[in-house]
Amino acid sequence: MFHMFSHLLNNVKLRTKLILSCIVVLFIPILIVGVFLTNELRNMALDNAMEQTHTNVQRVKARTTELMNVAYDSAYRLENNGRLETVTNRRYESTYEVVAAYREYTDFNEIRQQHDEVANIRFYMENPTMLNNWDFIQPDKSIKETAWYKKALTPGSGVNWYYLEDERDKRNYLSLVREINFADNNTSGVLVITLNMSMMNSILNQESFETMIVDDNNQIVAANRMGRTGKTLQEIDFEQSIVQEKSGMYSADIDGQASRVLIEPLVPESSGNTLRIISVFSVDTIVKDANHIKSLALTVIAISLIIAIFLIIGVSTIITKRMLRLSKHITKVATGKLDIVMEIDGKDEIGQLSRQFNSMVSSINGLVEEVQETNKMKNLLESKQNEIKLKMMASQINPHFLFNALESIRMKAHLKGEKEISQVVRLLGKLMRRSIEVTQRMTYLADEMDIVRCYLDIQKFRYEDRLSYELHIDPIVEKVSIPPLIIQPLVENAVIHGFENKVEGGVVIVRATSEGGLVRIEVIDNGAGMTQEKIDSVADQLSETEDAENNRIGLRNVHLRLQLTFGQEHGLQFESEPGIGTKVSFTLPFGEDLYV
């Protein structure tokens, strides 16, 4: 990866390299640190806002609870003083008696005068002899069918809080509702104490964030934002996913702005239902300063980057001019002009290159004559090498094979008088004749396999049961043209090197098949095999441009002839495992098209 990056960087102009270096080394770290710090500042602002919201909500909760406790204490006082039972359970004979009784009963007025937190008190009681006024009301059918009235008369319902309309001014108030039982008369009534909403709103108006008090029906009882009170959370497009949540901090989209919502339950003393305090603050408002700092930092970084780029362009222009002058002198030297001297214009690295350039030109002048002389010697050496290569290509069959085969025939003839000797001699003669008649012309694959068969029959005669072979030739490829003596050296190599140290029987398999527009030739043996290092060594020897003394000349000869005839991709390929065997294969085009 590093070498690939280095290679790509070498193709980039010097000016671009300097700009990229400045950006990567200086501005990217500054930008990362700046973004990190501003994000931390933003997160700190959000954390502080959430902490402040918790504090504010707890303060609202405490003050609202105090306000509601006044109504609860008043209800307890009215329930236990006995005067309310007297005035509501009496059977009046005249209107005068009712008015007189109402005038004498001052508890409601005393509570209203003593506690500003209480806006109004009314008591619903079924007593046909009583008159309706703002304090005592005979419940009609519409009142009896309301949910709050039914809930109040349900045994064990306790105290409940509702956002109810007051008959006096037709305005809604947060109201305490509870049943009061009169045990002596076996009767009951419903007491409603409404809170002073101005005081409740004043509690909320002291908060910096939008704050609401919501009842069980998601109706906003009080709010410090104009137009919220009396509406439901659904009507103000509150985030629907958290409408029913009872408590916790949530992220939501309120009025099209990303916001944080804190929901805190408010459970009054002995209450049968629960209110909720909801506080909302806009994230953008809280992080406004952090975003401003971030924008300012990005602006400063951008301006600094522009200034730095202009400075880099100026410096790189000066450096580039000097390097271009050096490049022009190098070009002149490349064209053969060796009598130039470059002016030294500094002591920096470019000046040092200039001095080294002048020294190099002087050295080149001294080496030119030596090169001309050595070229003559090199040409003579190459001609000798080419002559040796031609002689080596003509000698495809190892002379040791001929000597060993003839010696085997002699020994067989001496010891036995079998007919197979004549067959072996015939095969040997055929093989030698084919070798002598080899030319540069192409031959059919079937003819080449005939030579291979002759060779293997002779070797089988020599090794007897230690050698067996198989030839598998697809009939469709028998007429494919192939250079002569291409497969036989591979088979010879398999026999000699594969089985030279093998005592048990060896097998040589030669396969010729059609494979996707190509002819694949494989020579497989179960001989000694080679390690991966040995395979790599053989591959390196086949690819060498000069012949080494210990090179496998036969294999290299085949490899080069295949590549010269069909192309670089058609050279020899090796697969081998020690103790398992070796497979040598190559491919050639399924047609007459040649590489050269």
Image: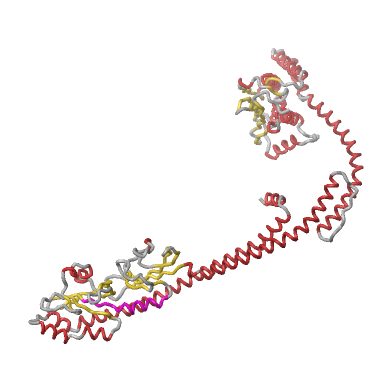
- Is residue 495 visible in the rendered structure shown here? no
What is the quadrant of residue 300 in the picture? Answer: bottom right
Q: Which region of the structure is painted magenta?
A: 191-207
Residue 58, compared with residue 581, is above or below; it is below
Asked if residue 225 is among those painted magenta in the image, a careful observer would answer: no
Q: Which of 168 and 51 is in front in this view?
A: 168
419 to the left or right of 100: right
Residue 57 spot, x, y in % from top left: 39, 74
Residue 563 spot, x, y in % from top left: 72, 30
Total marks shown come to 0
- Is residue 195 visible in the rendered structure shown here? yes
Residue 415 spot, x, y in % from top left: 73, 16
Asked if residue 202 is among those painted magenta in the image, a careful observer would answer: yes
Query: Quarter of the image containing the C terminus?
Result: top right
What is the quadrant of residue 69 in the picture? Answer: bottom left
Residue 538, compared with residue 229, is above or below; it is above
Residue 170 spot, x, y in % from top left: 25, 74
136 to the left or right of 320: left
- In the picture as drawn, the residue positioned furthest to the left comes out as 93
Which colour scheme appears in the figure?
secondary structure
Identified at 7% across, 82% down, the residue is: 93
